[in-house]
């Protein structure tokens, strides 16, 4: 399995064509392919755009994804985690979240999850599971998903991987079990927050169960949730 090619198909063709890696590269690819918002334009934005459809898509986007460059989301996760560990007060929002240090444990391309799998696949699993938290895919959404899978250049094993994730029920306990340590848990929680809509009861319950299963302290959860609200929510969503 070519993990980078799978990410390109999941996030949008070309999302891995630069040196960007990890969550930051994922965010950069999404921003490049989805003008007007994080999940706008399923045809250009890859399978994740089709998964989320309009009800969540319109509420995500925002200024952080226009930064481009390395480690947008990874930088947000690292900032929240390191501030929590140091017991630093929450600072005022900045225009540019810092990149995570290379050896910080926040670069998924260098990491293996608790089962020894590439941690980038764990983030895909987490995002798919979270996107299914409301428990319903209607006919229009299914058609978009099928069209997007068919439009990718994925190899057969990569398509099977995506299809297998889509066939699984949303399971925050199973997702949490894939994390080898707290930095991985922090990134999984943040990646899930990006595709969860707290205004939908099923999504809100999923978020609570995931945070509990990841055993993330309440303070760290609040910091991560704030980072999403400050940097990744579009103005019309707040």
Image (tube, rainbow, N blue to C red):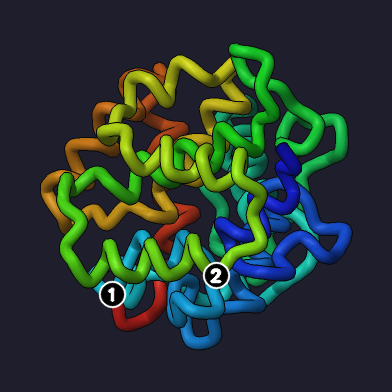
Residue 142 location, quadrant: bottom left
Q: Is residue 230 above or below residue 167?
A: below
User: Where does the image place residue 148, in percent across and percent down from the top left?
Assistant: 47, 67
Q: Can you see residue 96? A: yes
Q: Is residue 200 left or right of residue 145?
A: left
Q: Residue furthest bottom?
A: 36
Q: Is the Cβ of the residue at disc 2 closer than 8 Å to that at disc 1?
A: no
Q: Which mark is residue 151?
A: 2
Q: Is residue 213 left or right of residue 113?
A: left
Q: What residue is drawn where x is 49% and y is 79%?
A: 43
Q: Is residue 53 above or below residue 177?
A: below
User: Where does the image place residue 86, in percent across and percent down from the top left?
Assistant: 64, 27
Q: Is the N terminus in the top left, top right, bottom left or bottom right quadrant?
A: top right
Q: Can you see residue 223? A: no
Q: Is the C terminus in the top left, top right, bottom left or bottom right quadrant?
A: bottom left
What SS does tag 2 mark? helix
Q: What residue is drawn where x is 71% and y is 46%?
A: 22
Q: Closer to the N terminus: mark 2 or mark 1?
A: 1
Q: What residue is drawn where x is 54% and y is 60%?
A: 92
Q: Residue furthest front?
A: 156
Q: What residue is drawn where x is 58% and y is 61%?
A: 11
The residue labelled by disc 1 is 54
Q: Which mark is residue 186?
A: none
Q: Is residue 216 above or below residue 229?
A: above
Q: Nearer the viewer, residue 194 or 45?
A: 45
Q: Residues within 10 Å of mark 2 (few under 14, many from 20)?
A: some
Residue 10 location, quadrant: bottom right
Q: Is residue 58 left or right of residue 65?
A: left
Residue 172 location, quadrant: top left
User: Where does the image place residue 19, in percent across and percent down from the top left?
Assistant: 88, 58
């Amino acid at each position: 399995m070519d993990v980078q090619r799978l990410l390109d198909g999941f996030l949008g063709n070309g999302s891995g064509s630069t040196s960007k890696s990890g969550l930051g590269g994922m965010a950069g690819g999404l921003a490049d392919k989805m003008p007007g918002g994080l999940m706008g334009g399923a045809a250009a934005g890859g399978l994740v755009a089709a998964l989320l459809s309009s009800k969540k898509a319109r509420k995500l986007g925002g200024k952080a994804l226009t930064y481009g460059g390395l480690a947008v989301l990874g930088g947000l996760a690292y900032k929240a985690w390191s501030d929590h560990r140091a017991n630093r007060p929450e600072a005022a929002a900045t225009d540019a979240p810092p990149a995570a240090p290379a050896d910080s444990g926040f670069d998924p391309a260098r990491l293996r999850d608790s089962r020894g799998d590439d941690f980038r696949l764990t983030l895909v699993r987490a995002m798919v599971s979270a996107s299914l938290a409301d428990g319903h895919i209607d006919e229009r959404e299914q058609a978009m998903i099928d069209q997007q899978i068919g439009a990718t250049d994925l190899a057969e094993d990569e398509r099977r991987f995506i299809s297998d994730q889509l066939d699984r029920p949303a399971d925050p306990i199973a997702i949490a079990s894939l994390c080898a340590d707290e930095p991985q848990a922090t990134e999984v929680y943040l990646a899930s927050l990006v595709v969860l809509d707290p205004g939908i009861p099923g999504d809100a319950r999923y978020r609570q169960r995931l945070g509990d299963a990841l055993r993330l302290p309440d303070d760290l959860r609040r910091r991560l949730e704030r980072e999403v609200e400050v940097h990744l929510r579009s103005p019309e969503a707040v």
